[in-house]
Amino acid sequence: MDAEQVASLQEQVARSLFEAVSGAVEGWKQAEFKFEIVGGYAGEALIVDGDPNLVSAPIDVGGWLYELRAETASPSGPWFTCAVFITSVGEYNFQFEYEAEPEWSGGPRPSLGEYERDLEEFPRSQEDIPSWFPEGHSR
């Protein structure tokens, strides 16, 4: 993991989300961006002051988070969910979930091929494959 690259990607994501929310919602206080991914399939939701319908995330954010996932992958595998919390004063925090199944709040579940793609891109030992992966891929 390249710590400088990780910090740079996090800064890009946070700045882009901050600018999008600030440009669309007057007087906002806090926002949460949730990004869930398996293989090349991703779901996302941007919630501003509790409302998920105020603004969409900029298109570049998904690409940066895809890069961040690769940069922060451990030998046991990458994260499946990233939550980015930002405030109206520009503070931000990232949280990563490496084990739990994504909720897929942004749409339908991924196809079986996306789980296979994830394992091809980020090989894991059998014991590191989450139990919630589809039959034939899980432990």
Image: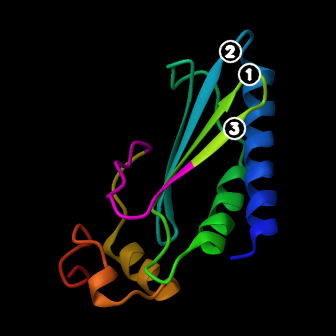
Compare marks 2 and 3 and give the one earlier in the sequence.
Answer: 2
Q: Is residue 102 in the magenta section?
A: yes
Q: Which mark is residue 88?
A: 1
Element assignment for label 1: loop
Kindly identify the residue that appears in the image at 40 percent across and 46 percent down: 107
Q: Which mark is residue 77?
A: none
Q: What amino acid does circle 1 point to? A: Ser
Mark 2 Cα-neighbour bin, 10 Å: few <14, some 14–19, many ≥20: some
Q: What amino acid does circle 2 point to? A: Trp
Q: Are marks 3 and 1 in contact (CB under 8 Å)?
A: no
**Magenta-drawn segment:** 95-106
Q: Which residue is mark 2?
A: 28
- Quote the CA–CA distance across marks 2 and 1: 6 Å
Q: Main secondary structure of the magenta part?
A: loop
| Residue 88 image point, x, y percent | 74, 22
| Residue 106 image point, x, y percent | 44, 44
| Residue 52 image point, x, y percent | 51, 26
Q: What amino acid does circle 3 point to? A: Tyr
Disc count in the image?
3
Mark 1 Cα-neighbour bin, 10 Å: few <14, some 14–19, many ≥20: some
Indicate which label's residue lies in the foreground, 2 or 1: 1
Element assignment for label 3: strand
Indicate which label's residue lies in the foreground, 2 or 3: 3
- Quote the CA–CA distance across marks 3 and 1: 10 Å
Compare marks 2 and 1 and give the one earlier in the sequence.
Answer: 2
Q: Are marks 2 and 1 in contact (CB under 8 Å)?
A: yes
41 and 82: which is toward the camera: 82
Q: Which residue is mark 3?
A: 92
